[in-house]
Image (cartoon, coloured by chain):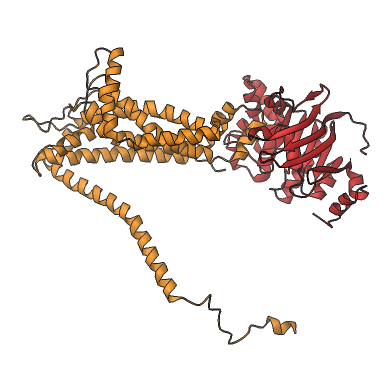
Amino acid sequence: MVTTTSPIKAESRDLNFYYSNGHKALKGITMPLYEKRITALIGPSGCGKSTFLRCFNRMHDLYPGNSYEGQIVMHPDNTNILDNGVDPIEVRMRISMVFQKPNPFPKSIYENVAYGLRVRGERNKRAVDDKVEEALKGAALWDEVKNRLHDLAFNLSGGQQQRLCIARALATDPEIMLFDEPTSALDPIATANIEELMSELRNKLTILVVTHNMQQAARVSDYTAYMYLGELIEYDDTDRIFTNPSRKETEDYITGKFG
Amino acid sequence: MTTQVLQKPIDLPISPRLAKNVRRHVLERVIEFILMLAALSAVATTIAIVVILLYESLSFFEHVSIIDFLTDTQWTPLFEDAHYGILPLVSGTLTTSAIALGVAIPLGTIGAIYLSEFASHRTREIVKPILELLVGVPTVVFGYFALLFVTPLLQMIFPELPGFNMLGPGIVMGIMIIPYISSVAEDAMRAVPMSMREGSYAMGATRFQTAVRVVTPAAISGIIAAYILGISRAVGETMVVALAAGQQPNLTFNPMESAATITAYIVQVAMGDLPHGSIGYQSIFAAGLVLMLMTLVFNILGHITRKKFRETY
């Protein structure tokens, strides 16, 4: 079991998820996320790790026919974010997400970062300016873009675009940040930058990251969960998962015998 | 042994699959030629039209000075006291087109946003074919619709509105153009990758915010292309205005008055029995040339705007 002194920030309780075609992609996942810690999800393609991640901000609601069973409870307020009475937009206001491929909007660098504030109705220019600067500094991008904040975001390199997306997600002070294979489209240097950034962000918020790259999970995360065919096989301290896993399946995957 | 394997075998015939196949080669060339002919036919037609317009206009401008043509405020080529000022026809064309676009651009854009971002799959499957059916209605039907239905309706609101006016046909033309604009704009919006929408939703945006602040700017280049198509349709539309806007050239931008457009004048003359070679007959080529140049200018302007807003994602 995970050894931690950190309180639980959110936990899924017996979570099942069905896609619109009836496929049961998650089978009874019960798993806590600890506050201000990085939790990594690993497992072979199709194991449900991205599906699980996307339950946390109700991304599946965008496509008709998907359904959840069970709970994801956020602390300290004990809200079940999968409850029908909970507005998915409220959930996304608290839990932000960084995607696999950088997906900046067709707007300036400034407006990309300000987007979350704008959709929340923030009109005070001074407040937006300050938040944009803070978020860009938080995403280690400020020095590179401070002189061209009004350039189109597409003119940035791939790694810069991904940091811009992190800044965008940071600007609204989320409690949890979801990373869905954030470096799989990036070169090794940009990847190292993002990983370093994630370690820094750990002081501010709770992070859940899906990765295909086991070294990445070992490098950045505090806890690691191994999933296979929609089930949570093992969840433990990252050190233990990679050195002394208790389940045979995990060991086979870690050592490359399978997957 | 290893070096032996690496050595290229000598005298081995090349695979028959790679050998030059004469029959296939000829067939390829024939197909290529047919495809090129098909592409050329459109280009050749355009060139032929431009040449004829220029040639006939040239003899027109031997009789009428270009300055008169561009500055005279009367267009009466068929009268005793003939005036050849194109401005009244241009004003009629621009006024009816502006009304049409005033109707078609907002409604077409809203329709595209609705179909692309809000409508369920089922709704889209029902609404789209109906919209496309609108494209299939002959324009002469729209013309009578403007003359016999919309104008009387407008007369209830504006009793002083004459039976021939630019407002009625302008509005009907706008309705006629909506499906062109909504269809092209919707395609552009649906081509915006889902990842961009997800990015917006993940920030806590609503559907409407996502549609207006992210999807529309991302698709703006295609949306402008839809507007250009709409403008070309409006400027070139003939039947609706010829039937319902009147055929009196009238230098006015007041939609409550009747006026002739360039196209309406061309039909009027082309269907009359003017002798070939007369100035009156040649005047329709000059008018056609102006029409073509107007469309060209709008197209170029649209192209420049599109380039300016072009986004890559």
Q: Quadrant of residue B162?
A: top left
For residue B24, above or below residue B237: below
> B282 or B84, which lies in front?
B282
Outermost residue, left side? B80
> A235 or B54, which lies in front?
A235
Q: Position of residue A185 (x, y in %)?
A: 68, 48
Left or right: A84 as drawn, with respect to B43: right
Q: Position of residue B15 (x, y in %)?
A: 56, 78
Left or right: B192 as drawn, with respect to B32: right
Q: Quadrant of residue A14?
A: top right
Outermost residue, front side? A22
Residue A143 in sight in this render: no
Q: Residue at x 91, y 48 (%)?
A: A247
Q: Quadrant of the C terminus of chain B?
A: top right
For residue A229, above or below residue B155: below
Residue B261 in sight in this render: yes
Disc count in the image? 0
For residue B26, above or below residue A180: below
Of the chain colours in the picture, the one used for chain A is: red
Q: Position of residue A216 (x, y in %)?
A: 80, 47
> B28 or A101, which lies in front?
B28
Q: Residue at x 80, y 36 (%)?
A: A200
Left or right: A231 as drawn, with respect to A151: right
Q: Position of residue B30 (x, y in %)?
A: 37, 67
- Which chain does the orange colour mark? B
Q: Quadrant of the N terminus of chain B?
A: bottom right
